Image: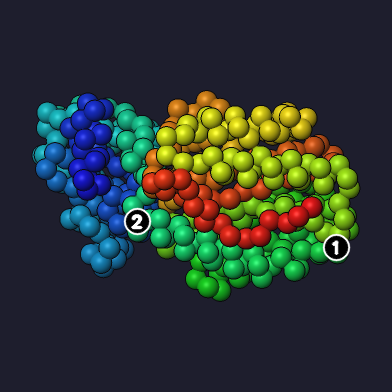
Amino acid sequence: MSQLEQLRAAMGRAGVDALWISDAANVRYLSGFTSGKDGKVLVTPQDATLYTDARYTVQAAQESRVPTFIARPPATLEHAAPGLAGLRVGFEAESLTVAELEQLRTYWPQATLVGTAGLLSDLRMVKTPDEVQAVRDAQALADRVFAQVRPMIRAGVRELDVALEIESLLRRVGAESAFEIIVASGPRGALPHGVASDRVIGDGELVTVDMGARLNGYNSDMTRTVAVGTPSPEMARVYRAVLEAEEAAVRAVRPGVRGADLDALARDILTGHGLGEAFAHSLGHGVGLMVHEGPSLRGSSEDVLRPGMIVTVEPGAYLPDVGGVRIEDLVLVTEDGHEVLSRSEKEAV
């Protein structure tokens, strides 16, 4: 079943006849148009149309898998209006602004507008073979860059310099950083989102590096915590506990497993080490066109793993004013188990 056929089936279940797609990643997913932030897609029972402006005439013709109409609002809305009379038209409530919704009401008075959520994000959870390869390529590139940067993570080097080197190497090979790079050393390791600062790395510290590559629109995500010199016995103990939780959760990834159960597995191991309260976030998330997308690996998640999903497994433990550890792998759910896409070595601490 094609992506459009799957979407129309989901639309039927949601009770809408047509769907106005405004989320940039969803526009790209459905049409192939890589400048999704400057496009919209309208899906009706019979047709699908990409709407973008004249800056993208050539690009849209080269990339789009659906017919294209080149104009700016309100001409785009006027073009769509005749085919929407009497239909229930869904809009993406999480990405459409109030001003844009008022425009739809003005130009589509004969349609019934209905807010929707998750129709395409649910479909995007299971990757096509081409998408899997795109994420695989992005992660392989991230692994190569990390291997080049690892020797410079040493005492006397600023966190910022490590992050800048990662970003520079990604740029040189035609990629970019998937998100703001985290380099958190010593006590700053207790910050789960401790983006690189001008702090100088000290001897005997652990350094958490969270990085990803965005290549051809698709992302990777990986975290390694590395030792500079010999860390304290307490932080070495924390590292080994997080590694135990991470590897156990990775081994448990397979079709049919609930995201909530994976989170509980890792959390129980850390709790057994007295670190349950130090695990301050969920176990993981999906990765694809967005760095953070479905499925969710958190305690409240109802998502169940299926072949073709790509998820992170990233337990952590964060001790205020002391330090922290996070270890994260990127994992593909296969027909009979899993494949770890992130190949960077994990240190023995």
Q: Is residue 124 visible?
A: yes
Answer with the quarter of the image where residue 313 lies.
Answer: top right
Which residue is at 17% across, 55% downward? 67
Answer with the quarter of the image where residue 244 lies.
Answer: top right
Which residue is at 75% across, 69% downward? 151
Front-most of residues 342 and 152: 342
Q: Earlier in the sequence, mark 1 or mark 2?
A: 2
Q: Is residue 48 left or right of residue 299?
A: left
Front-most of residues 14 and 138: 138
Residue 239: where, in percent of width, then height? Answer: 76, 45
Q: Is residue 88 above or below residue 36?
A: above
Residue 29: where, in percent of width, then height? Answer: 33, 51
Checking the image for residue 155, the label placed there is 1
Which residue lies under the disc numbered 2?
Answer: 129
Dot 2: within a 10 Å radius of its alpha carbon, few (fewer than 14), some, or many (20 or more) residues? few
Residue 330: where, in percent of width, then height? Answer: 54, 51
Which residue is at 86% across, 42% downward? 234
Q: Mark 2 falls on what kind of element?
A: helix
Do the residues under discs 1 and 2 have CB atoms within 8 angstroms?
Answer: no
- Say what amino acid the circle numbered 2 marks: Pro
- Say what amino acid the circle numbered 1 marks: Ala
Q: Is residue 141 above or below residue 208?
A: below
